[in-house]
Structure formats: C-alpha cells, structure tokens
Amino acid sequence: MNRPRAATLLGIVLVAGALVVLVAISLTSAIVYYVTPTELAARSTGEPVRLYGIVAPGSVRWNGADSLLSFRVTDGTTTVAVSSRSLPTALFRDGVGVVLAGRSTEPGRFMADEILVKHSEVYQPLKPGETIPPGLLERLGAGGTTP
C-alpha cells in the first residue's frame, strides 16, 4: 500500500517539476530588454536588439520618395542615426522616448523594423480654471491628432 502512494507522489512531483521548467523557459524567452545608444556602441552589428533613447530635437526627416523615416536617438552621451520604413504613431516627435526594434547596421547606425513611442502613464486632470484647448474634442472625434 505504501509503494503505490510513493509512485503516485513521485509522478506528481515530476509532472509539477516539468511544468515549472516549461513556465520558466517561456517567461525568460518572453522578456525583452533594451539597450541605450551607449550600450549599443559596445555590441556587434547585425544582432537583433531593442534600442531605447530620446529622439534628438530637429533630427526627424521623412523621405517620401523612398518612404524612409530618419532621425537620431540619444541617451545624453551617445547619439545613433536611425532609419526606418515603419510609420510611428502620432505621439512620435522630437524629445519623446522611443523603443526601436531592429539591428545595428554599422557603428552609429540603426535600422528599426518597429517604432514604439514611450509615454507617461500619469493622468493629470485639468486644474481649476483650466479649459480644454479649442477644437481638441472636434479633432479627437474626427480621428485627428493633437499638436
């Protein structure tokens, strides 16, 4: 009577252990870290990576003929030139934080396949006496963007 219980307990422990290992492997492969431009400079070119930085003011250029967006990203120490055929969201602008999925093509240059705009999670309601900017609700209702 003791042997079947021990075998059942051993089987349950093995199955539970296998599930823990599978979950751990899944979670580690799902975690994606990003690097800064300074850290990117120390890596080899060609490997896929996510790059985080701030869009350098005055650096955004759109080439309509080639459908190529180019801009610079900085971490305050190092600046990387970025090119992308991916269109960013309306939140993309100078000075905004971005996470770029892609690869370094050569030192100081990055080709982004995906552009994710970082934004604050902080919601600040209007202060007493403040009003909504004129035309904002109409632009939002029409699917437009705000300045």
Image: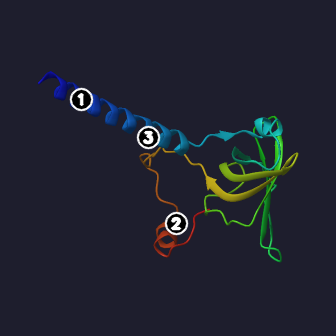
Which quadrant holds residue 78?
top right
Q: Which mark is residue 7?
A: 1
Circle 3/circle 1 CB separation < 8 Å: no
Determine whether the residue tagged by mark 3 lies in a helix, strand or loop.
helix
Q: Residue at x 52, y 61 (%)?
A: 133
Rendering quarter of residue 2 = top left
Residue shown at 62% from the left, 40% from the top: 33
Determine the CA span between mark 1 and mark 2: 74 Å
Q: Which residue is mark 2?
A: 134
Relative to residue 121, is residue 89 depicted above or below? below
Residue 107: give x, y in percent of width and height.
Answer: 88, 45
- Give the secondary structure at mark 1: helix
**With 52 as the anchor, is 64 left or right in this view?**
right
Callout 1 amino acid: Ala
Residue 22 is labelled as: 3
Q: What residue do we see at 27% from left, 33% from top?
A: 12
